[in-house]
Amino acid sequence: MKMTRIEMREKLRERLTDKRYEHSLGVEYTAAALAMAHGLDIEQAAIAGLLHDCAKCYSTEDKIAKCEKYGLPISDFERQNPELLHAKLGAAVAKDKYKVRDHEILSAITWHTTGCPNMSDLDKIIYIADFIEPNRKELPEMDEIRKEAFLDLDKCLVHILSNILDYLSRKGSKIDPITEETYNYYVRNRK
């Protein structure tokens, strides 16, 4: 049986930390606003935004065990960086525990962390909303990125990806190959 967004919120509230729950409400709100601005389904965006981190608060061991339970492949990079698993696991949890059957919502949850080449507009909105929602700490260029989000999703996506890749590179962190692929795809296709 289908759940309402209010029921989803109540269930999610029990499973996330206060801070993560507030972030999820911020992404829900921002995704709905972006959907409105870009002529997309507002309810679809709101649900994807609300549930995008529904698997975030599991322990590393639980994330791996649940991925195996749901038959989700785990790459070598994800085994080394298990915090990335919450995205694909979140899509499985959204389907199983929150009764989401909409493949576009599940795709947006799956790709909200790394992005992927050839994202749908909903995928882009959730990726962007996760980055710009009002509870996020202010990052360099955030004002500009927030404006771009309402004007040009692809330009905004490239801007965010560029900042993330630059930040990870400066920090000496490993970069998920899918994030690099996504950046290269959108830089090539914007020209």
Image: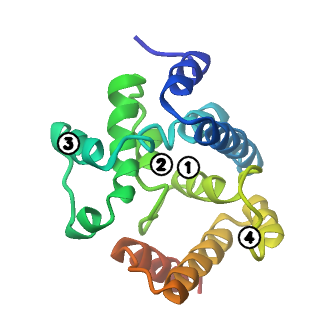
Q: Which mark is residue 122?
A: 1
What amino acid type is highlighted by mark number 3? Ala
Quadrant of the image occupied by residue 182: bottom left
In this image, 23 relative to 62: left or right?
Answer: right
In this image, 169 relative to 125: left or right?
Answer: left
Front residue (pair 76, 158): 76
Q: Which residue is mark 4?
A: 139
Position in image of residue 36 (x %, y %): 74, 43
User: What quarter of the picture does the N terminus occupy?
Assistant: top left
Q: How far, Cα to Cα, is label 2 from label 4?
A: 23 Å
What amino acid type is highlighted by mark number 2? Ala
Q: Which of disc 3 and disc 1 is earlier in sequence?
A: 3
Front residue (pair 68, 37): 68
Q: Which of disc 2 and disc 3 is earlier in sequence?
A: 3
Q: How far, Cα to Cα, is label 4 from label 3?
A: 34 Å
Q: Which residue is mark 2?
A: 108
Nearer the camera: disc 3 or disc 2:
3
Q: Hey, which residue is sitting farthest top in the picture?
A: 1
Q: Which of disc 3 and disc 4 is earlier in sequence?
A: 3
Q: How far, Cα to Cα, is label 4 from label 1?
A: 23 Å
Q: Which residue is mark 3?
A: 65
